[in-house]
Amino acid sequence: MYTVKCLNPISNRGLDLFTSEFEVIDDLNAADAVLVRSASMHDLEVPDSMLAVARAGAGVNNIPLNEYAEKGITVFNTPGANANGVKELVVAGLLLASRDIIGGVNWVKENAKEADLAKMIEKKKKEFAGNELKGKSIGVIGLGAIGVLVANICNRLGMNVYGYDPYVSVRSAWSLSRMVNHSSSLDEIYEKCDFLTIHVPYMESTKGMIGKEAVQKMKDGATILNFARGELVDDQAVLDGLASKKIKHYVTDFPNPAVAAADGVITIPHLGASTEESEENCAEMAVDQLMNYLEKGNIVNSVNYPNCDLGDIEAECRITVHHKNLPNMIGQLTSALAEEGYNIENMLNKSKKDYAYSIFDVEKRPSEKVLSKMKQIDGVIRLRVL
Ligand SMILES: NC(=O)c1ccc[n+]([C@@H]2O[C@H](COP(=O)([O-])OP(=O)(O)OC[C@H]3O[C@@H](n4cnc5c(N)ncnc54)[C@H](O)[C@@H]3O)[C@@H](O)[C@H]2O)c1
Ligand SMILES: O=C(O)[C@H](O)COP(=O)(O)O
């Protein structure tokens, strides 16, 4: 039996996938695994016995990835599972920034009881007039699951699309419309684009990447859309840009007190992935990956350990080892088994930066003496017997 704690509400479509071998519990300290959305885990004490964290979503900046890797806690996310939800909200953001839909809707509500409302509307509507998206240029920074969908739909809306992603994956490159212009520098995007939408993860290297210098280089009257993370955009740079009319609108899914009330800011309360469909997709994927890992030791879509998948357990015993990515780890682990005559039927080893993961399918369960010897090898972080 495995126990799972949900730190945020997780769609039942995912939770219902848990078999009778799993129980969702309230006590974090008794949990083998955590399911989480945006709740911050940075200041959370998790028990040493914790095996895994599955983020039902994309961004993992709420999870201390290295600290958990060091403890042998595998962290998963659900790549692409909410990308369509975000893409659709970005289109809404583009429309809200181009036409004063919000001003118009509010004005009608305020005057709803006026008997001659229809007449008033025809007189007033010029104040809410705007522009069309067709023919405008947009820069998409970050061409991952969301950026690709945004770039492609903007192309279909008749916009001139410029994409920037120095680390673009082959999969994304294949999915991108050939009508999207490949920008090799952010400067090109700043100089050419009426709209700029950012879809990169928040990391130390991307913090404040839309700052004062970037704003200065932008076209006059540019609109910035941020559906990725608030910290990617420097608040003061945007406020100054809005005040000087350099920036027309800042559309953000991550409002904070510094920018929320400012003129020109269009605020959305982190709704990008808050659709029934995205929540279900993320929950299903997270639960599926968690069960596969807890029961079979397979790692699919981890962000702090390598993907390592040996399929169903066909041998009598499967041993999984989280370890440091050091020379001769496999030699030492396999020798410990071989010295006591345990035959390895199948094995897989993968590494990701400083960490590695190995799966050994063994003909029978090794003795405690062998398992203890394996655990004591320098660089071994965690060993599980399944
Ligand atoms: N608003 C929401 O509800 C919501 C929902 C999902 C994701 N997000 C945010 O959006 C981010 C992106 O999500 P995704 O699913 O597309 O992730 P992804 O991992 O599929 O794509 C991220 C892309 O950014 C690129 N990238 C990284 N650093 C870059 C840089 N310095 N310059 C340009 N490109 C860079 C990567 O190469 C990758 O292609 C997430 O990390 C998360 O913070 C927000
Ligand atoms: O990174 C993500 O997936 C989004 O920001 C969605 O976060 P949420 O699951 O809290 O809505």
Image (cartoon, helix red, strand yellow):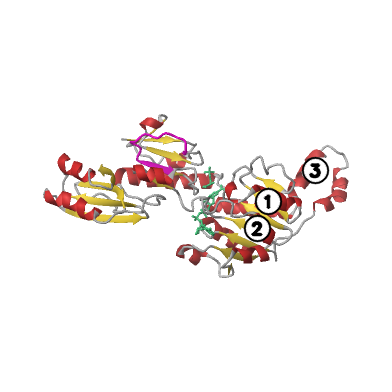
Please state which amino acid type lies under the numbered disc 3: Trp
Between the residue at mark 3 and the residue at mark 1, the CA separation in whole angstroms equals 27 Å
Q: Reply above or below: 112 against 187.
A: above
The mark found on residue 107 in the picture is 3
Residue 156 visible in the picture: no
Tell me if 361 is positioned left or right of 273 in this view: left
Residue at the spot x=41%, y=38% of the render? 34
The mark found on residue 238 in the picture is 1
In-front residue for pair 246/124: 246
* Image: magenta residue range: 41-54
- Cβ at disc 2 under 8 Å from ligand 1: no
Q: Is residue 44 magenta?
A: yes
Please state which amino acid type lies under the numbered disc 1: Val
Label 3 environment density (alpha carbons within 10 Å; few <14, some 14–19, many ≥20): some
Disc 3 or 2, which lies upstream in sequence? 3
Label 1 environment density (alpha carbons within 10 Å; few <14, some 14–19, many ≥20): many
Q: The N terminus appears in which quarter of the rendering?
A: top left
Please state which amino acid type lies under the numbered disc 2: Glu
Secondary element at tag 3 = helix
Q: The C terminus appears in which quarter of the rendering?
A: top left
Between the residue at mark 2 and the residue at mark 1, the CA separation in whole angstroms equals 11 Å
Residue 201 visible in the picture: yes
The mark found on residue 213 in the picture is 2
In-front residue for pair 21/221: 221
